[in-house]
Each structure stands twice: as C-alpha cells, then as structure tokens.
Image (cartoon, rainbow, N blue to C red):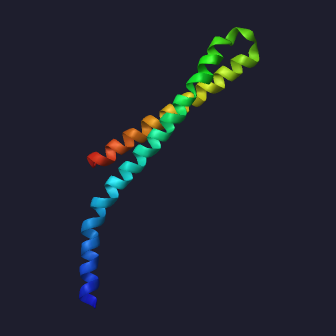
C-alpha cells in the first residue's frame, strides 16, 4: 500500500504542473476576454459623453466617469492577457 501511495505521489508531481499551468493561463485569458468585453460596452457611454460635453457640468462628470471605467477595464484586460502570456512562456 505504501508503494502505491509513493507511486501516486510521483505521478501527481509529474502530471500536475503540466495541467495546472495551461489551466492558469486559460483562466487569465478568459478573464482578459471578459474585461475586454466590458471595456467595449463602455465605448458608447464614452462617445455619447464626449458629444454632450458642452451641455453642462453633469455631462462632463458623466464623460469622466465613463472614460475612467473604460480605461480601468481595458487595463485589466491587457494585464490579464499579459499575465497569461507570461504563464504560458514559463517565466
């Protein structure tokens, strides 16, 4: 029984790193895609806020908040894709 446990530990030590790394990279790619989709959804509010800038200070605030959210979401997406690339290259 002890030999079987040792063999199972060796097997898991050999197989798990080869399985976990691609799953970790895939997870970051999926997150990057979701953040990118959310950033794309923010394009319309940024554009309409830009067109309505001359209508008052509340439109300026709406534009600034939309642009800020767009930048944050796009930054998260880029970072997630960059991290997935780093993981897949092994560095």
Q: Which of 48 and 20 is in front in this view?
A: 48
Q: Residue at x 53, y 31 (%)?
A: 39
Q: In which quarter of the image is residue 17?
A: bottom left
Question: Which residue appears farthest toward the bottom when viewing the image?
Answer: 1
How many numbered marks are there?
0
Q: Nearer the viewer, residue 4 or 33?
A: 33
The x and y percentages for residue 45 are 62, 23
Q: In which quarter of the image is the N terminus?
A: bottom left
* Residue 9 placement: quadrant: bottom left
Picture coordinates of residue 29, whole percent (x, y): 40, 44
Residue 68: image location, x then y, percent: 60, 27
Relative to 54, say whether 76 is above or below. Answer: below
Instruction: State the residue at coordinates (43%, 45%).
Output: 30
Q: Which residue is located at x 29 percent, y 71 percent?
A: 12
Specify the farthest residue to the top: 54
Q: Is residue 27 left or right of residue 39?
A: left
Q: Is residue 31 above or below residue 4?
A: above
Q: Write the residue at 59% across / 18% down.
A: 47
Estimate the x, y position of residue 81 in percent, counting from the top left: 39, 39
Establish if 23 lies above or below 32.
Answer: below
Residue nearer the viewer, 52 or 56: 52
């Amino acid at each position: 029984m002890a030999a079987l446990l040792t063999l199972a530990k060796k097997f898991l030590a050999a197989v798990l790193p080869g399985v976990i790394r691609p799953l970790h990279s895939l997870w970051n790619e999926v997150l990057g895609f979701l953040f990118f989709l959310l950033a794309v959804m923010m394009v319309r509010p940024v554009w309409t806020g830009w067109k309505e800038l001359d209508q008052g200070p509340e439109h300026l605030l709406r534009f600034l908040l939309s642009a800020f959210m767009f930048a944050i979401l796009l930054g998260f997406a880029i970072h997630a894709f960059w991290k997935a690339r780093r993981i897949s290259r092994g560095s």
